[in-house]
Image (spheres, rainbow, N blue to C red):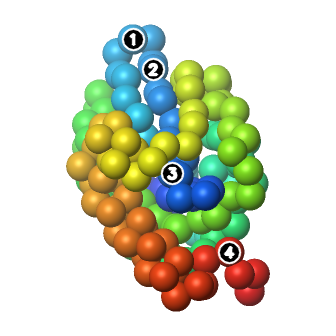
Amino acid sequence: MIEATSCGGVVIFRGKILLLYKNYKNKYEGWVLPKGTVEPGEEYSETAIREVREETGVEAKIVKYVGKSRYTFTVPEDVVEKDVHWYLMMSDSYYSKPQREEYFMDSGYYKYHEAYHLLKFPNEKQILEKAYSEYMEMKRNSLWGNSK
């Protein structure tokens, strides 16, 4: 068993959520949240910011930690158990540019219900639900968009 750790973000701008569309040699297609592997010496929050920037071109700020998802997948020689630490993040524009080197063909901001139905993986849907409810709570309390 291989253990891996990634970090990612639920990035929101004006109530819409940033998603990426991945298409790898027509083998895997689906909408995902931006995330990636922690590099040596990197804090989880730094990884989340860097990965969002690398995969989408978006400069996002962390608002708060949302939680962790865990899943396993198989590679030819082994099983990988992956933990992903998720952050609720804020962007200041609709601009995004998918990272072609990582096989991302499209990116964009979607309304919550659209994003929820587009997401391929159940664990990302759960994180989206949690992050979006935190976002709505912060908006209700006029805490969203206030610089700390």
**Residue 145, which numbered label?**
4
Q: Classify residue 49 by image quadrant.
A: bottom right
* Amino acid bearing label 1: Asn
> With respect to residue 51, does 22 lie above or below?
above
C-alpha distance separating marks 1 and 3: 25 Å
Depth check, front residue: 15 or 10? 15
**Amino acid type at mark 2:** Asn
**Residue 85: x and y, percent?**
45, 66
Residue on which disc 3 sits: 17
Q: Quadrant of residue 121?
A: top left
Between marks 4 and 1, how big is the CA–CA gap?
39 Å
Q: Amino acid at mark 3?
A: Ile
- Which residue position is annotated with label 2? 23
Q: Where is residue 72? Give x, y as percent.
A: 25, 49
- Give SS at disc 1: loop
Q: Secondary structure at mark 2?
A: strand
Between 139 and 28, the one lying in front of the other is 139
